[in-house]
Image: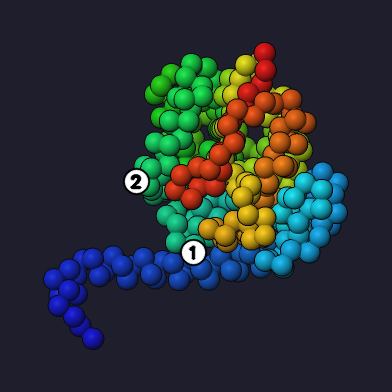
Amino acid sequence: MIRARHIRHPLGVARELKRRIERAISTRRAAQFERAVPREAREECWCGGKVLPFRWHASYGVCAECGCYVNRRPPKADALSGVYSLDDYWRHRQVSKGIPPIERRGDFYREDGRLVYWLGLVQRYRPSRGRVVEVGCAPGVLLVELGKLGYECIGVEASESVAAWLRKTQKLDVRTGIFPGIEVPCCDLLLAFDVAEHTPSPTRFWTEIGRVLRLGGTAIVQTPIEFQDYEHPFKTRPDWFDDLEHLFLYTDKSVRRLAALADLDIIVLEDAPLLLGQVCVLKKAC
């Protein structure tokens, strides 16, 4: 049925139809991609605790020791770089979830307020200049803005296709590999926004942060951390139980244990705005 608004706004209707077609294509492509990713079984938490059944999601268990929510059928470690490729992940899987692809992601971060929030965190907790390493830096807009403030910027991305795109379009120094397991120089500031939940080894991830930071350095980690309702965790974001991407979802107890293992002091542990999860600010004591 043709309505008056369709006649008045034909371009808007055409754009909406185009978005729906793109999302349908991406959803089909993403489903094929997800089925092809090799998986493995995990029955033990990073802390060595036994993984108990978790009633809210069949693919996850809950650690009896630290409370972490553990993905029991994660992708194999040698498949992770392929999981985060430019086309399958950033252009198809993201669009299938209703999120803009990498080419429009920077504008999305500016519009929804998270870029301003991230810059505010840096200015609040690390006002001086220095070297910054951002793990999981796509789409690159945060490093671009920090470069304008005088920081020496280095990014890390799992997939070479994404790293190459960032070097070409954003002119950034981006290293390819899974952190940890990739050589990056020591830094004054380490950033990891929506990354820690993707790591196959939280112990190595957090201790490597401690190793890479210079004395007095700051790390800002944004990741899902449950510290309010253990009976029904992350009830505002059930999509965080994504068993392709999210290998560990943390609790405040587990984060405190990981920070202690890395010899890092927790300065802030609180909710982030915009349903982004939680933010943990850490310092490497002088």
Residue type at tag 1? Ser
Relative side of 11 to 171, left or right: left
The answer to whether residue 120 of the structure is visible from this angle is yes
In the displayed structure, does residue 226 sit left or right of residue 20?
A: right
Q: Which mark is residue 96?
A: 1
Q: Position of residue 118 (x, y in %)?
A: 46, 35
**Is residue 172 found left or right of 43 in the rendered image?**
left
* Image label count: 2
Where residue 44 sits: x, y (%)?
84, 53
Secondary element type, mark 2: helix
- Work out which residue is located at the far top of the displayed protein and give it: 286
Pick the quarter of the image with the C terminus.
Answer: top right
In this rendered view, identify the residue nearer to me: 163 or 77.
77
The residue tagged with tag 1: helix, strand or loop? helix
Q: Which of the pair 77/247 is nearer the observer?
A: 247
- Whether residue 25 sits left or right of residue 30 in the image: it is left
Q: Residues within 10 Å of mark 2 (few under 14, many from 20)?
A: few
Mark sitting earlier along the chain (2/1):
1
Residue 41 position by quadrant: bottom right
